[in-house]
Amino acid sequence: MRERRTSRRGWRTGVAAWAAALAWTFGIGDAAAAEPGLVGRTIVIDAGHGGPDGGAMGINGEVEKTITLAVAFKVADLLREAGADVHLTRTDDDDLASDEDRAARRRQQSDLRNRTRFVRERSPDAFVSIHCNSAPSPAWRGAQTIYMEGNAEGERLAKIMQAHFRAQLLPTKREADDMNTLYLLKRIEGAAVLAEIGFLSNPDEAAHLVQERYQQEVALAIYTALLEYFAPSAEDPRDASPSMA
C-alpha cells in the first residue's frame, strides 16, 4: 500500500505541468489547479468490474479491471486538485457484492445494485463509469461515450467527453451513443455516462491502455470534459444545487 501511494504522488507531481499545458491548449483552464466550475462539485468515478469479474481480456493478457482502476485513480487526483469532491466506487481489486449474495452466487446483480446505491447516496453532480471495450474483430477501435436514452444531461456530458476523446486520444471516428439497457445508466439520473476508453481486442489500443502515460492522457480527457461541462458562463450561470436527484 505504501508503494502505491508513492507511485501516485509521483504521477501527480509529474503530470501537473503537462496537464496544465494541454488543458490550456484546448482553452479550458488550468488543470491540476482550483477551477470555479469544479470547486465543491460532487463527482463519482466508477472503475468497471473488479474482484473475480475481470471484464474484457486483451490479446496480450491485459485485464480491463486493472486498467479501469488505474485510470479512475488518475481522474480522481485531477478532479480533487481542481476542488471537486470525488468518490470512487472501488479503490482496490474487489467488487461491491455483499457477502450474502456472493455465497448465493448472485454476485454480479448484487455488485451492480450496490454500485447504484453508492452513487445515489452521494447525490453527485456527475457520474462517470470507466470501461474498456472488446469485439470479435481486432480491427474495431476507438474510445466512445455512452449515455441513457432520453437523459439530456447525460447526452450533453457524453458529447463533450466524446469530443475530448477525439481530440486527445488515439484516433477514433466514434460518436457518443445512447442505450437503454445498461443497468447503472438506467438508474442514475443527470450527468451520467459510461466511458469506453478503448478496445482491448485491438492490438494498438491494448498496448497503449496498459501504459501509464496513455492512462494519464485518458484521465486528462475525462477531466477536461468534466471541466468544460461545469464551466460557468454568463449565459448559463452555475447553479449551486446538484444536477442529480
Image: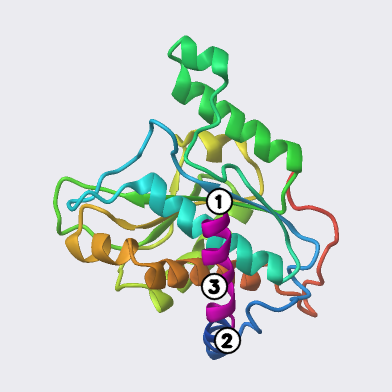
Q: Residues within 10 Å of mark 2 (few under 14, many from 20)?
A: some
Give the vertical position of 208 relative to 2 (above or below).
Answer: below
Q: Residues within 10 Å of mark 1 (few under 14, many from 20)?
A: few
Indicate yes or no whether the magenta region holds residue 7: yes
Q: Which circle marks residue 53 in the picture?
A: none
Q: Which residue type does callout 2 highlight? A: Ala
The residue at which mark 2 appears reads as 17
Q: Quadrant of residue 20?
A: bottom right
Q: Which circle marks residue 10 in the picture?
A: 3
Residue visible at 22% across and 49% down? Answer: 61
Residue visible at 59% across and 78% down? Answer: 13
Q: CA distance from mark 3 to mark 1?
A: 14 Å
In this view, the mark in front (3 or 1): 1
Residue visible at 52% across and 58% down? Answer: 3
Q: Which residue type does callout 3 highlight? A: Gly
Q: Earlier in the sequence, mark 1 or mark 2?
A: 1
Stretch in magenta: 1-16
Question: Is 209 placed left or right of 239 in the picture?
Answer: left
Q: Please, what secondary structure does the residue beneath circle 1 have?
A: loop
The residue at which mark 1 appears reads as 1
Work out whether residue 166 can be spotted.
yes
The secondary structure making up most of the magenta span is helix
Q: Position of residue 140 (x, y in %)?
A: 20, 57
The residue nearer to you, when weighing 84 against 191, is 84
Q: Earlier in the sequence, mark 3 or mark 1?
A: 1
In this view, the mark in front (2 or 3): 3
